[in-house]
Amino acid sequence: MATRAKARDWAYEDEAGRRMATECFDRVPESVAEARQLATEAMAKWQMEAIADRAELVTSELATNAVLHARRAAFRVTLRGLGDHAVRIEVYDFSRTMPALFVAGAHQVHGRGLALVDAVSQCWGTDRLPWGKRVWAHVEAPTAYESPVPVQPDETPIWATRKSQAVYMGVVLVAMGSLAYGTRSR
């Protein structure tokens, strides 16, 4: 098992009295699913179902980056409750190389994780630490404007926010690029 901690202590609070869940993971691919499970359990325990999907996605993407790019054998994931409708997700690792948001090409396997984090979080960033870095993101419950518009089964969904439109266009462009390059004779 890749998890370093044996049991989760849900009564844990940070110095500001905010709910907190934190756990160290070995830097192996299996730890991404375990980090996502930490987020799933925290969102359920804290009754934050409205942001559970976003928190799980952000945790998964940031943990994946730590597995792929960190220098040492472990990384830490911390979730901090910010009131009843928001969470801060932090991933600590020992690499001082800062992540960068960029547009991945159609044939690139990696490079879309931070674009997803940017699309589903209110804000994200990185902090240099003396021994490495912290990559963090704030995830909040959708506002009335961001809430999905009810769609009839025969209708096309409406993408109401700029972030959702950007993600949708990115997916469309990747699909079009794959079709265009995939059908060319060489």
Image (cartoon, rainbow, N blue to C red):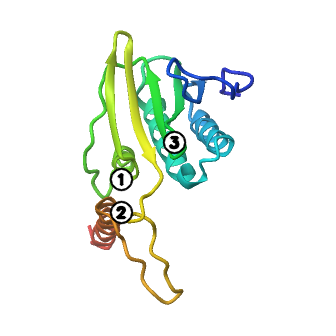
Q: Position of residue 161 (x, y in %)?
A: 33, 64
- Callout 3 environment at 10 Å: few (<14), some (14 to 19), or many (20+)? many
Q: Which of marks 2 and 3 is in front?
A: 2
Res 119 label: 1
Q: Is mark 2 on a helix, strand or loop?
A: helix
Q: Given the image, on which type of amino acid does mark 2 rest?
A: Ser
Residue, x 50% and y 21% (percent of image)? 16
Residue closest to the eye, 55 or 111:
55
Q: Is mark 1 on a helix, strand or loop?
A: helix
Residue closest to the eye, 177 or 23:
23
Q: Distance between the residues labelled 1 and 3?
A: 14 Å
Residue, x 61% and y 41% (percent of image)? 33
Most extreme residue toward the bottom is 154
- Residue 182 in which image quadrant: bottom left
Q: Where is residue 82 in the image (x, y as percent from the top left)?
A: 49, 36
Residue closest to the eye, 171 or 35:
35
Residue 121 shown left or right of residue 87 in the figure: left
The answer to whether the residues at label 1 and label 2 have Cβ atoms under 8 Å apart is yes
Which residue lies under the disc numbered 3?
Answer: 60
- Residue 22 in which image quadrant: top right
Lower sequence index among marks 1 and 3: 3
Residue, x 31% and y 66% (percent of image)? 165
Q: Distance between the residues labelled 1 and 2?
A: 7 Å
